Amino acid sequence: MKLIRGAVVTMDPERRIIDEGAVLIDGSSIASVGGYAQLAAAHPDAEVAGSATDLIVPGYINGHQHLTGDRLIQSSIPDDLPPGDAIFTWSVPVHAEHTGDDDELSATLTLAESLKNGVTSTFEAGTVAHPDRVVAAANKIGARLTIGSWGWDIEEGPFTGTPDEVLDRQRESLSLADGELIDAWVSLVGHNLMSDELVVRASDLARSQNVSLTFHLSPSTSDTDAYLARTGKAPLVHLNDLGALGPHVKIAHGVHLDDHEVQIVLDTGAAVIACPWAYLRLGQGTSQSFRHLDLWKAGGALALGCDAENAGDMVDGIRTAALFAGLAKDTTLDPTVFGASDALELLTIRGAEALGVDAAVGSIEVGKQADLVVHDRTRVEWIPPSDDPVLQLVWGSDGRSVRDVYVAGDAVVVDGELTAVNLDDLAAEAHDAGRSLLRRAGIKP
């Protein structure tokens, strides 16, 4: 058994914060949560880690992350390109040239950054060419992963195919789930790049396999324009009329939704994953159409994502949560509408609920998986400590104060360093792989 000591932010139904607390881990699960003195006395043989000054929180949940493609050319796509150019003149050609080795290396680096910043659960965005290699990376590094692969049936593009071919690929990806740290979901690229037949059959497949379906939709106004031109309806109105929506659907983005579409999300129980840093970097108008707050206020299913390393760039859940909170306050001119505790909920338990994994993760409760993040409050940004640790965590800190991380009870980050991977060994390989990737994609490094 392991006893992790510190102030415990449980995110349980009562949202308890235990100042002189501890979490007892037995195998992969949380065995007890309470005061440190009582737990130490009751379990004198337990291995003790941490100190009274530490802050223990549930593992952070990243609901939308591209694990391949962008990582090897991180922060290389210019931030002043016209709408669409970043995707179709950079990202898609790069994805088309990704080898299996590239996928595994890219995923290793992204998951390494994720874990070091306290993100224990990563939901892949659905643009992986070699999902088995991404699973290998997650298993090697010890991350909790939900994998997805390419799914689109447009006429041209990497890994496109007929609906039958796309769905066969999805079934192959679903077979990678192992019942432990690796899950899988049906994933389509989305936008206006999926036929009605494909999205309906993909939704049926997800329902039949009791898994989720994810796709990109409406980060900008272009999807609305395309659906109106093709169907005469807004995107989610059309998809709902097809019967493709439901609580199994997890919509990435959903920035530009009209009132009818917002109500459809609420009525169907679908979830939306907000990636605010991507919308600001790409200039997609989230500050003008912050429908995510409307969904949150109405009790809708909502999670946070970090997106890609040329959109959100940095894979840091706390940084993302703080931005979401700031947008909520600023776009409404109401600082009372949303706060630090709400932001942490989206990053933990409320995000877990939206993504359908709250039975296992998202809060520090007995019986749940021991996914824990320990922040070091001896660092300068925590001095002096606030009486409200959540306020200080969201507004005064970020992933850099993460010292230790546990996934299913295993220490995957100790004293700020990964236990399974030496990043120094990957640095030169990543540099060379990224430059080779750009050359093969026809983009001058």
Image (cartoon, grey):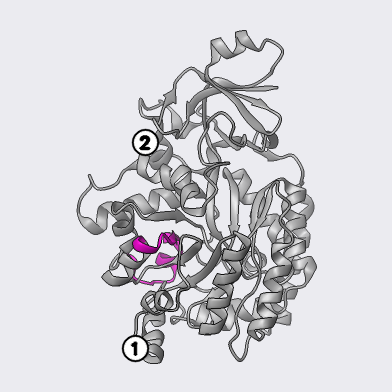
Where's residue 339, x and y in %? 31, 43
Note whether 40 is above or below 410 in the view shown.
Answer: above
- The residue at the point 62 percent across, 44 percent down is 116
- The residue at the point 44 percent across, 66 percent down is 253
Report the residue marked by disc 1.
232
- The residue at the point 49 percent across, 26 percent down is 8
Give the amino acid type for the residue marked by disc 1 in the picture. Answer: Gly
Report the residue marked by disc 2.
391
Measure the C-alpha gap from mark 1 to mark 2: 46 Å
Which of disc 2 and disc 1 is earlier in sequence?
1
Exactly how many numbered labels are in the figure? 2
Specify the segment rendered in magenta: 266-286
Residue 159 colored in magenta in the image: no
**Residue 291 appears in which quarter of the rendering?**
bottom left
Where's residue 152, x and y in %? 60, 80
Note whether 113 is above or below 92 in the view shown.
Answer: above
**Residue 108 appears in which quarter of the rendering?**
bottom right
